[in-house]
Image (cartoon, rainbow, N blue to C red):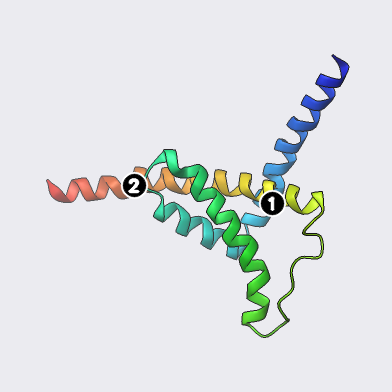
Amino acid sequence: MEHVSGYLHDILYFFKDGIREGFAHVNGALGLLIALYAAYQLSAWKRIWAVALGATLAHLVAVIILPVLVNEGTFRLPPDLLELSYWKTAAALFLGYLVAIAVFFALKTQFLSKGASAAHH
């Protein structure tokens, strides 16, 4: 039973710190642009998981490709790609995008759909 509580503590700690770390990455200009675009493209709440996953993949690819596009570096895969820390960061980024896209989509459905229905009356 002690092992189970230890594992639960680790999982809860990951979610608490993962959301904070995910927001740290999403809160930059690149992350906010990706989250806004993802929320704009989202059509229903049930697709939020897939859209957040797509936003996470877009962010991870953009971090690799952007230095190449602005001629600041050559194409290189992340050096820690096969380490657990990279995938923990990716999972935290997913949690951050999940929350950010949910907030933006809630604002979109609250304010943008009301204006469209009011214009029809």
Q: Which mark is drawn over residue 110? A: none
Residue at the image position 71 percent from the left and 83 percent from the top: 72
Residue density around tag 1, few if under 14, some if 14–19, many if 20 or more, within 10 Å: many
In the rendered structure, which amino acid carries the disc numbered 2?
Answer: Phe
Residue at the image position 55 percent from the left and 59 percent from the top: 32
Measuring from the top left, give residue 89's x and y in whole percent.
Answer: 73, 51
The first of marks 2 and 1 along the sequence is: 1
Residue at the image position 41 percent from the left and 50 percent from the top: 42
Question: Which residue is nearer to you in this view: 79 or 30?
Answer: 79
Q: Which mark is drawn over residue 90? A: 1
Measuring from the top left, give residue 13's x and y in whole percent.
Answer: 77, 34
What residue did someone put label 2 on?
111
Foreground mark, 2 or 1, reads 1
Which residue is the extreme one toward the left? 121
Which residue is the extreme one toward the front? 82
In the rendered structure, which amino acid carries the disc numbered 1?
Answer: Ala
Measuring from the top left, give residue 99's x and y in whole percent.
Answer: 56, 43
Residue at the image position 67 percent from the left and 56 percent from the top: 25
